[in-house]
Amino acid sequence: KRVAEQIKADMKGKNPLFLVVLNGSFIFAADLVRNYTGPCEVSFVKLASYHGTASGEIKELVGLNEDLEGRDVVIVEDIVDSGKTIEHILEQVNSQRPASVSVASFLFKPDVFKKDFKIKYTGLEIPNDFIVGYGLDYNGLGRNLRDIYVIKEK
């Protein structure tokens, strides 16, 4: 609700496009959009960069199919850690000359983020732990958990 209110204040008089990064951000995106009280549109992209707890090469599974020129775009992400995935998306989005681009992430790991762009809207800042629940998974499992949990390796 807090993030939706911040975006609403910044987007006054605008019709933002929420560009949701699947799969992990689907629950956060649903809550965000339900709490956003202004006009908006929603679209989806799907990327993969994790196998288990290891981050790897970014693979585009469902691509961007919207014309973004002149649009106000809010990229909705589940978690930003190294910033590699969001950097990849920002390159694609910015190549289409949008009016504005910002990032809203449910979780943010400032200790491992080393990129030179800003994550404008964040739900929670967390340490560099591997998290599941509330849409985030470990090898496909745990997305349906209501709360977030830290994966502890034995």
Image (tube, helix red, strand yellow):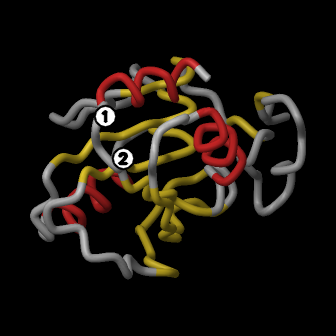
In this image, 84 relative to 133: left or right?
Answer: left
Q: Where 99 falls versus 139 (above or below)?
A: above
Viewer-proximal residue, 112 or 146? 146
Q: SS at mark 1? A: loop
Q: Locate residue 50: give its quadrant.
A: bottom right
Residue at (54, 26) in percent of width and height:
128
Residue at (48, 66) in percent of width and height:
43
Viewer-proximal residue, 55 or 64? 64
Q: Where 116 falls versus 5 (above or below)?
A: below
Mark 1 residue type = Met
What is the tally of numbered marks visible in this picture? 2
Residue where numbered disc 1 is placed: 11
Q: Quadrant of the N terminus?
A: top right
Q: Where 43 falls versus 18 (above or below)?
A: below
In this image, 105 relative to 97: left or right?
Answer: right
Mark toward the viewer: 2 or 1? 1
Query: Where's residue 85, x and y in %?
Result: 38, 55
Determine which of the numbered discs, if any, sits on residue 42 in the image.
none
Verify CB contact (< 8 Å) between mark 2 and mark 1: yes
Viewer-proximal residue, 9 or 128? 9
Determine which of the numbered discs, if any, sits on residue 74 in the image.
2
The disc, 2 or 1, on the residue closer to the chain's N-terminal end is: 1
Mark 2 residue type = Val
Q: Is residue 126 visible?
A: no
Q: SS at mark 2? A: strand
